[in-house]
Amino acid sequence: MLRHIDIRDMLIIDRLELSFQPGLNVLTGETGAGKSILLDSLGFVLGWRGRAELVRAGAEQGEVTATFDVPNDHPGRAVLDEAGIEVEDGEVILRRINTREGRKTAWINDRRVSGEVLRSLSDTLVELHGQHDDRGLLNPRGHRQMLDAFAQLGPHLEKSRVAWRALADARKALGLAEARVAKVRAEEDYLRHAVAELDALDPQQGEEAGLDTQRRLMQAAEKIREDVVRASQAIGLQGAEGSVTDAMRWLNGVAGKAEGGLDAALEALERVAVALDEAQQGVASCLDQLLFNPSDLEVIEERLFAMRGLARKHGVVPDDLGLFADDLRSRLSLLDGSVKDLAALQGDVMTSQAAYDAGAERLTQARRKAALALDKAMAAELAPLKMERAVFATQIAQAEPGPDGADAVAFTVATNPGAPAGPINKIASGGELSRFLLALKVCLTATDAGLTMIFDEIDRGVGGATADAVGRRLAELARDGQILVVTHSPQVAAFGRHHWRVEKHQSKTETLSTVTPLDAQARIDEIARMLSGDTITEAARAAARSLMPQ
């Protein structure tokens, strides 16, 4: 609820302080007195788009401060909490400055805020209704939200949003999996060929070094064998082994006569004999290895070169070919497994889609039911406003699916039976539009708890009994809330609980606008003025008294 507004140096207002009350607050005055400036100033502190030049002539800056009551359960608390702004005693103070150069700065409870935060909060605080309003009931983008609030579809909407998020997550997971599979599939032929090539070769760890050793050994085998044969002859029976054997035979023949003097020598010769035997066996083994078929060298070279070729091809060392092959196999396994994963993810998407579609259909049915109820309620409200022949219809059409379902909602009217229906702001005249907006607001008022509503000349184009009906509806609408009405209608003004007169004063140097709160007698005089003009007669006062509720 708006409690107080302080305006300094804005257009033709030098200093103005107003305190508003619950119920119906009425502002009256001559055309051009400054009523629209008051609304411009309020819109400025709320962050609404408006006039570019608001600073009063001769002033360096204009400033507007507005104080609101924002209880704990007010929707604006969520905006304030998100912005990290503390609230004491339920009071929220908005302050905004506009310099002569056009720079605008805003604060909420003495904390500087962006225009985005200010506008988000203002949407929960004040709602403006008028013939040129594009933020309220005339904005088709908000019609679905209004219908949902009217039908109290909050639980349905929450389920729909949960289902939409689940569907989005399932689609994202499927998309990522499909991208991975597509990437692997792009190289599938390469992977399968490479794995088959590696499997056919079956390289082993350390094999390349062994093959290289064998190859070099075979290439030098003739020269090596010649020297090894000489060595074999040198340590064989014709060489060292024979000499050691002869020496051991000769010493054994005389050892018994040497009284143990040859024992050490014989033991040494035995050790030499054993060593020579081992050497002979090693040399013989080497000679066996040096005996090869030339085709064996070709086989070894072919395998060695194949291993080295594959290593160069894949950019790895020969010893890592086995590990590389394992990696390729795992990538192929990923592909094969991903096909199964894709099927599971596709199933998740289908399940999520079915859940979302079911929720969206429930929303659609609930909206259609609520649309009929709203149309019926509107028909009941339009009759007292002398628009019983007008037809209000809530149109529901299919739209792109989203978190809040797959419906597009639009409020349409036909001013006469049989006339084509169309958007409210396109079909209705000024007076009709005002009454349509008022009736619609009455039907939707339960959805706007804690919202201050402003009706800017919503009674334009109506008078007499119709204006009286407008006043009664505004009073009813303001019973449990707060409404500010800028009006030229004495019938509407008569229903106000609180009344202010806006006046313009001119001097030789400047023009200023003032706002004066009216007591009971001043109210009678103001309504009488609205009825009769500048000359207020007793008859006009009597007529004014007759208009005011007793």
Image (tube, helix red, strand yellow):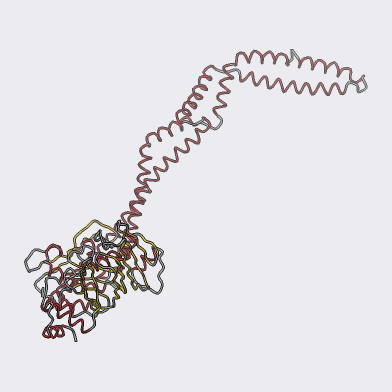
Tally of numbered discs: 0
For residue 246, which quarter of the picture?
top right
Question: Residue pushed farthest front?
Answer: 508
* On screen, residue 549 above or below 179: below
* Quadrant occupied by the C terminus: bottom left
203 in relation to 429, above or below? above
Q: Is residue 46 or residue 164 the one in the foreground? A: 46
Measured as percent of width and height from the top left, residue 505 is found at 21, 71
Q: Quadrant of residue 329?
A: top left
Q: From where the camera sits, is residue 414 visible?
A: yes
* Left or right placement of residue 379 versus residue 359 in this view: left
222 displayed left or right of 522: right
Please provide percent x and percent y for residue 125.
Answer: 30, 69
The answer to whether residue 362 is seen in the rendering is no
Q: Going by the picture, which residue comes out furthest to the left?
A: 418
At 82% from the left edge and 16% from the top edge, which residue is drawn? 247
Which residue is the extreme one toward the bottom?
550
The correct choice, above or below, for 423 with respect to 536 in the image is above
Q: Position of residue 315 (x, y in %)?
A: 47, 30
**Residue 395 drawn at (x, y percent):** 17, 64
